[in-house]
Amino acid sequence: GDSVTQMEGPVTLSEEAFLTINCTYTATGYPSLFWYVQYPGEGLQLLLKATKADDKGSNKGFEATYRKETTSFHLEKGSVQVSDSAVYFCALSDPGSNYQLIWGAGTKLIIKP
Amino acid sequence: KAGVTQTPRYLIKTRGQQVTLSCSPISGHRSVSWYQQTPGQGLQFLFEYFSETQRNKGNFPGRFSGRQFSNSRSEMNVSTLELGDSALYLCASSLAYRNTEAFFGQGTRLTVV
């Protein structure tokens, strides 16, 4: 079945550092890919998405490119801020799984001033 | 435009009791999905409703049920509560069934004692 694998956290970085959170997937169909962010005590917010190969999703300085050849959707940001501290979830939605969202385990990001 | 509203935000129940959680989707959204989030299992899909009909169901026991009303509001019910049902329950709304972009509420934190 479909699955999403994220790098384990927590990831601890200093402010203004470069961020990469790895995400790879397996899917029976041709999925759409998402990154969601969860701040402490809150629900999930859609950060960015990509619906086809080579698409780049971007929002708030974060980017991720849909790489079909490596089945990856890594999240990057050039210069992180303390306010980026949160848990980041990679997810897919696949026609083969009736479009239900399949989630990675989440990666906790801690940014130190 | 109001977001997804979940009520109540927090609940404490005793083993064996039953509980009902409510979700009001974004105005105009007709699909509502429910997810359970726990530290051990992560995010797991419960079910999706569209046009008052359950369209998709995750791998949860029959104690977990839901419904959707004609105004798209949804409720989920858990009967005969177990300690393991303690979790954050998240509701997400989408414009339509199989729409790939989901917007989440802040969740209901259920604690079973």
Image (cartoon, coloured by chain):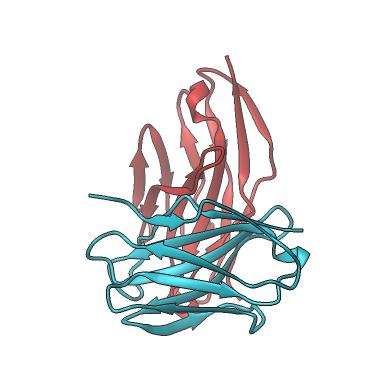
Chain colours: A red, B cyan
B9, above or below B21, in the image:
above
Residue B61 placement: quadrant: bottom right
Closer-to-camera residue (B9/A60): B9
Q: Nearer the viewer, residue A104 or A21?
A: A104
Q: Please give the name of the residue rendered at 54% of the width and 44% of the height, measured from the top-left corner.
A: A88
Front residue (pair B44, A52): B44
> Which percent across, then down, holds residue A12?
65, 27
Image-based side of B52 in relation to A2, left or right: left
Residue A5, percent from left and from top = 63, 56
Q: Residue furthest top?
A: A113
Residue A105 in sight:
yes
Rendered view: B17 above or below B42: below
Left or right relative to B53: residue B84: right
The quadrant of the picture occupied by the C terminus of chain A is top right
Above or below, A87 relative to A17: below
Q: In which quarter of the view is residue B51 placed?
A: bottom left
User: What residue is rendered at 48% in x and 22% in y?
Assistant: A81
Quarter of the image for the N terminus of chain A: give it: bottom right
Comparing B36 with A90, the one in front is B36
Above or below, B50 against A11 in this view is below
**Image location (x, y in percent) of residue B28:** 22, 65
**Residue A10's spot in the image, x, y percent?**
69, 36
Res. A69 visible in picture: no
Residue B46 is left or right of residue A10, and the answer is left
Q: Is A75 placed left or right of B109 in the picture?
A: left
Q: Residue at x 53, y 71 (%)?
A: A27
Give the residue drawn at x 24%, y 61%.
B27
Callout count? 0
